[in-house]
Amino acid sequence: MIRVCIVEDQMLVRQGIQTLLGLVDDIEVVGEAVDGEQAIELIPRLRPDVVLLDMYLPRRSGLDVLRTLTASQALPPTLILTTFDEDVLVIGGLQAGARGFLLKDVSLDRLTAAIRSLAEGGTWIQPASTERLLRNRHRLSTDFPSAEPREPLSSRELEILRLVARGYSNREIADG
C-alpha cells in the first residue's frame, strides 16, 4: 500500500483527490495539510511514501515546504500538483527537492501512475512541461545557472529525454 499525504489549501480539490485515490486499491491517503506550516509539521510525523504538494499555499509556499523538509532530510518523494504550468515552478520545485510535476487537470490514471513511479524511486514530469523546457533550455539555463548540465547529454540521452517528454514508458523506451 502506497501511503500518500495531500497538501492542498482548496477543500474541494483536496477532498476530490482523496475521494478519487480512495478508488485505487494500492494507494491510501494517510494525511492532509491545508497550508505550508501544517505540511512542515505533519509530513515528518506521518512519513508518507509520497506527498502531493500544491505550490501556492497559505502561510508558507510549496517551495518553502520543499526547501524546509529537504534541509531537515524529512522530504519524502514529492509530486508538485498545481494549476499553473510555469517553468519557474517546475525548475524551482525540482531544484528544491520535488521528484515530479503534474497539472491538476490530469486524469486519475496518470496521477496514480505518477504516484506509483515516485513510490518506486522514479520521477514524473508532465510531458508538455518537459517538451517546453527542452525547447527553452538555452534561455532557462541563463535564468537558472545551476540547471546547466556539467557535461553535454549524449545523443542517446537526448533521445530518451524526448521520449520521456512524449509520455513513453520505460519499457517502450527500452524496446524502441
Image: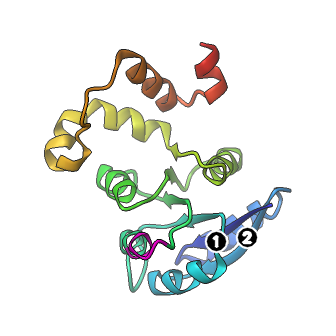
The answer to which of 106 and 144 lies nearer the viewer is 144
The answer to whether residue 100 is left or right of residue 151 is: right
- Residue 29's label in the rendered image is 2
Residue 20: x, y in percent? Answer: 75, 61
Residue corresponding to mark 1 = 5
**Which is nearer the eye, 46 or 113?**
46
Residue 88: image location, x then y, percent? 29, 54
Q: Secondary structure at mark 2?
A: strand
- Quadrant position of residue 175: top right
Compared across the picture, whether 52 is left or right of 59 comes to right
Q: Position of residue 79 (x, y in %)?
A: 53, 58
Residues at discs 1 and 2 in contact (Cβ within 8 Å) = yes
Q: Is residue 131 magenta?
A: no
In what quadrant of the picture does the N terminus appear? bottom right
Q: Report which quarter residue 94 is drawn in.
A: bottom left
Look at the image and say whether residue 70 sits in the magenta stretch. Answer: yes
Q: Residue at x 32, y 25 (%)?
A: 153
Say what secondary structure mark 1 lies in.
Answer: strand
Please give the name of the residue rendered at 61% of the width and 29% of the height, measured from the top-left corner: 170
Query: What number is the disc on residue 154?
Result: none
**Quadrant of the frame with the C terminus:** top right
The answer to whether 71 is drawn above or below residue 104 in the figure is below
Question: Is residue 120 or residue 137 the one in the foreground?
Answer: 120
Question: Quick one: label 1, few (<14), some, or many (20+) residues within 10 Å?
Answer: many
- Magenta segment range? 68-73
